[in-house]
Amino acid sequence: MALRIIATGGTFDKHYDEIKGKLTFSASHLPEVLARTRITAAHALEELPLLDSLDMQDIDRGRVLASCVNAAEEAIVIIHGTDTMQETVAVLGAAGLPKAIVVTGAMIPYKVANSDALFNLGYACGAAQLLPLGVYVAMNGTVFDWNKVQKDRVAGVFKAI
Amino acid sequence: MALRIIATGGTFDKHYDEIKGKLTFSASHLPEVLARTRITAAHALEELPLLDSLDMQDIDRGRVLASCVNAAEEAIVIIHGTDTMQETVAVLGAAGLPKAIVVTGAMIPYKVANSDALFNLGYACGAAQLLPLGVYVAMNGTVFDWNKVQKDRVAGVFKAI
Amino acid sequence: MALRIIATGGTFDKHYDEIKGKLTFSASHLPEVLARTRITAAHALEELPLLDSLDMQDIDRGRVLASCVNAAEEAIVIIHGTDTMQETVAVLGAAGLPKAIVVTGAMIPYKVANSDALFNLGYACGAAQLLPLGVYVAMNGTVFDWNKVQKDRVAGVFKAI
Amino acid sequence: MALRIIATGGTFDKHYDEIKGKLTFSASHLPEVLARTRITAAHALEELPLLDSLDMQDIDRGRVLASCVNAAEEAIVIIHGTDTMQETVAVLGAAGLPKAIVVTGAMIPYKVANSDALFNLGYACGAAQLLPLGVYVAMNGTVFDWNKVQKDRVAGVFKAI
């Protein structure tokens, strides 16, 4: 099933800037990541401004929603920071779009050793193709309904509520 | 949903033996891989003898089938070499077990740069939890019915038949 | 020739803390790195408190100097942050110890993709074993005398002055 | 000091061919590796045919010697397979060229996890710039004279003889 993958930044896509000596954003790693997956299912990659999700404002969430509304695909994966994933899925869930929208991210950047980014992306792609219409968070090898999930910031995992 | 993950070897789990100077099998990388996924869904890892799938005999496929029969879980992911995945899913498919069994693998070993292993594992875990009962191959970001798939050895991708 | 390798932190040894979402210090990566080098030359690893070199105070540089004074080995490699390498080699150079002391570091952490850490460590180990007694900075595949080097912060490379 | 780096293949430069399912040679990884080192010392990269060193014939060693003879640089690093490093340094050593020639390689390919390639390259670059004229093997964080070294194939390390 055709997929739309929307990059919004987050830990998944952070880049180490060796001049500044910190993690920031540069070009998205998603084109490289998607080539690595060897995915043959039809898919489109859409890069929105890459943000730390703590910096996301209403206007940014509105832009994510607009991308979902405008998508030709019914299966959508959104790469998002983990800290405010809950706020974004609330916006998407309230919209009640006739699509399967799966939001994922990473606890460790794709470019850092021991990253969960590639696993999470694979999991989210499978989930978006197979889930009924709705909005979900996919993290920790688990699918959560958008309004029944929160991040446990101490343990660093998502839990059902 | 609880998962059983069965390691049978294949390219996914190959290890570079620096004394022999070639890719072979040592201990499975799956324990390390699963820790990296940060999976919180209930799961069991079962390690069968690790084999190059070109070396798999009927007895080896019988062992994989027995593991599926005996599994308490209804969602099963099997890590398998890509060259004879088709033969193994034929054995599993003919058995008609009341479980969702998803076979995956990798074109590049987990321990080699640019590997698709982690993506494929994530995709297969999501698929095994969400698919109806049946036997499937999950490769290239696509779910294939067990009796409608083959590996295109020239292109290095799986295709529907 | 026997080597002493002194870890002081710096970008080389930074660790991504997935709970805090930032690069910080945990246990040094040097034990793992040294195993990876397959070094058979006699060597001792000494771990000082791991610091961002921007946080290094006189007392910290004094501790590095004391380690050099007390070292049984005549060839010493110091892993150090790049931002204040110059200040530390000034302290070491002024001491005039009868040892070959080579200070190195990394522009990208060992655990981040595309890191120069392992190359720099190899280069510094070779240099410490082969240089005449003195204090040096080894970065960018180049040996610099301690009092004739500075970091070009815009270009992110070390240059002779 | 200006360096010439000569790629001849060996484990260091092996590439996983996902269609054939084995380690072979494709384009050399050295251009990517050298960019990663951030080396600013003047250097030239020369790519000879990439070979498993077990496949090296007299004519291949002659080609390596010719490259050393013709090199404008006095410091030369040769990337070579470990199995017949000894035979190649015998040819180079007998020639008595007025250059510092350091032969290195890797026990694990650059593109495979836990590779020693980058460390060895760094070590060899430092050694080639600092050693007196002569021919050397640099492996395991140790410099060996060309006629006083052999590979211990059981332990996978180089030893003085």
Image (cartoon, coloured by chain):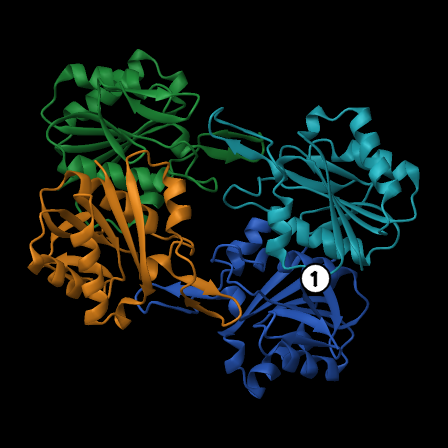
Chain colours: A orange, B green, C blue, D cyan
Image position of C133 (left or right of B112): right
Q: Position of residue C68 (x, y in %)?
A: 67, 74
Q: Quick check: can you spot residue A153?
A: no
Using the image, determine if residue B25 lies above or below residue D96. Answer: above
Q: Position of residue C154 (x, y in %)?
A: 59, 74
Q: Quadrant of residue D89?
A: top right
* Secondary structure under the numbered disc 1 in the rendered image: loop
Q: As rendered, which of C8 and A66 lies closer to the eye?
A: A66
- Residue furthest bottom in the image: C58
Q: Which residue is mark 1?
A: D40
Q: As rendered, which of A121 and B27 lies closer to the eye?
A: A121
Q: As rendered, which of D123 and A92 lies closer to the eye?
A: A92
- Neighbour tally class for label 1: few under 14, some 14-19, many 20 plus, Cα within 10 Å: some
Image position of D86 (left or right of A61): right
Q: Quadrant of residue C96?
A: bottom right
Mark 1 belongs to which subunit?
A: D
Q: Quadrant of the C terminus of chain A?
A: bottom left
